Image (tube, coloured by chain):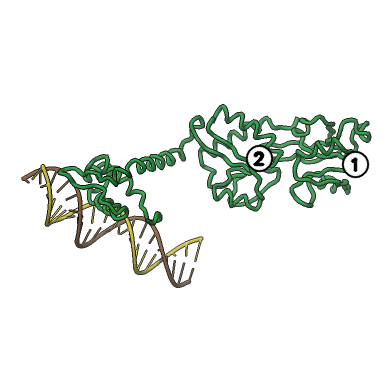
Chain colours: A green, B brown, C yellow
DNA sequence: CGACCGTACAGTTTCTTGAT
DNA sequence: ATCAAGAAACTGTACGGTCG
């Protein structure tokens, strides 16, 4: 049986005949003519290689094959109707759904706990999965339905993606407490003299700190470059290195925080989603929840 | 005889394919 | 990517056959 050749409408006709016990009555229910029902039944008979209904007097009696099929057929039809209905409505209290995110450690640590806590109250049957994915695969993963949201601190332009800024933060310098070089605070000379941990997903290239320094004709001393913000504190506490982190993350550690001795643009956080999901009610609802939890995610 | 199913045929719609 | 032509599929009308 070639599933690609199956007309799913045939099962709606099958259900109507089974319920009505008559092709004529089924035709009335379906608002088509009796021959159309007869023809649909003929195609279904050929497809399933069974008469499905036999004439007994003035009614059509289902065969054993039809009796076996009716329950799963009705379940499938109900599922289809439910799916179509849910694409136009969304009830978070009853919805059973999973959203896939691709967020870096920083955003996972800051957004996910609040988001999950919020979902526990508003949408108890909605779950979240966060996993790493290369930027180059984001669009194809979204198009395939394997990824719902991608969040990042940099802009990402693609005609297939929608974008919304959901938060911003300021960068601060982080160092161990009682750092011998920072007894009098952090000035530009000290900032440039100390070794730095630079967090970047790229192997090389300038970040916002380096760009700001470059405008002043300065350059910092990069001692370590890593992918994850969360490895920074454990390195800092053992060394005299410093690092520049978003304030809302830096404040969680028992380390010394210093304002940067020069102007740096704030870090902006964006969420991205596929254009095909832009009008999906469940997706729209989740975007609202992200914006809601991110409203507390501001520099202090 | 009335009710209902199945078939033939024709018109319409949808899909496929090839050209641009 | 778009358009047009042909093929295929679907549906409705008319009508014949079957059953109670």
x, y percentage for residue A123?
Answer: 54, 31
x, y percentage for residue B9?
Answer: 20, 62
Task: Identify the residue at horizontal 41%, vertical 40% (top origin).
Answer: A79
Q: In this view, does A181 lie above or below A51?
A: above
Q: In this view, does A28 lie above or below A204?
A: above
- Residue mark closest to the camera, 2 vs 1: 1
Task: Identify the residue at horizontal 23%, vertical 51% (top origin).
Answer: A35
Q: Earlier in the sequence, mark 2 or mark 1?
A: 2
The residue to which callout 2 is attached is A165
Compute the Cα span from label 2 to label 1. Answer: 33 Å
Viewer-side residue, A55 vs A144: A55
The residue to which callout 1 is attached is A194
Q: Residue C17 vs residue A243: left or right?
A: left
Q: Residue A298 vs residue A120: left or right?
A: right
Q: Residue A172 vs residue A158: left or right?
A: right
Task: Identify the residue at horizontal 85%, vertical 39% (top origin).
Answer: A242
Report the residue that reaches farthest toward the front: A64
Q: Please tell me whether mark 1 sits on a helix, a strand or a loop.
A: loop
Q: Please tell me whether mark 2 sits on a helix, a strand or a loop.
A: strand
x, y percentage for residue A50?
Answer: 27, 52
Viewer-side residue, A186 vs B4: B4
Split into 4 quadrants, where in the image is the C terminus of chain A? top right
């Amino acid at each position: 049986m070639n599933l690609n050749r199956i007309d799913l409408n045939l099962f709606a006709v099958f259900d109507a005949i089974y319920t009505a016990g008559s092709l004529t009555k089924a035709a009335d229910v379906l608002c088509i003519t009796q021959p159309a029902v007869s023809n649909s039944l003929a195609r279904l008979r050929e497809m399933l290689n069974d008469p499905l209904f036999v004439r007994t007097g003035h009614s059509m009696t289902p065969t054993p094959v039809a009796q076996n099929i009716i329950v799963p057929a009705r379940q499938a039809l109900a599922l289809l109707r439910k799916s179509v209905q849910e694409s136009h409505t969304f009830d978070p209290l009853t919805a059973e759904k999973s959203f896939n995110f691709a967020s870096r450690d920083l955003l996972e640590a800051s957004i996910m706990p609040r988001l999950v806590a919020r979902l526990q109250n508003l949408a108890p049957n909605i779950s979240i999965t966060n996993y790493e994915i290369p930027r180059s695969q984001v669009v194809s993963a979204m198009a395939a339905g394997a990824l719902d949201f991608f969040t990042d601190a940099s802009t990402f332009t693609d005609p297939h993606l929608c974008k919304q800024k959901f938060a911003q933060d300021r960068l601060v310098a982080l160092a161990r407490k009682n750092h011998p070089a920072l007894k009098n605070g952090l000035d530009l000379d000290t900032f440039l003299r100390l070794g730095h941990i630079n967090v970047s997903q790229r192997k090389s290239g300038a970040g916002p700190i380096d760009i700001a320094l470059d405008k002043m004709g300065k350059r910092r001393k990069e001692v370590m470059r890593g992918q994850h913000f969360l490895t920074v504190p454990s390195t800092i506490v053992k060394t005299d290195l410093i690092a520049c982190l978003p304030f809302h993350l830096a404040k969680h550690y028992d380390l010394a925080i210093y304002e940067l001795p020069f102007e740096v643009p704030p870090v902006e956080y964006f969420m991205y989603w596929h254009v095909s999901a832009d009008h999906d009610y469940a997706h729209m609802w989740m975007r609202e929840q992200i914006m809601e939890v991110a409203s507390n995610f501001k520099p202090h």
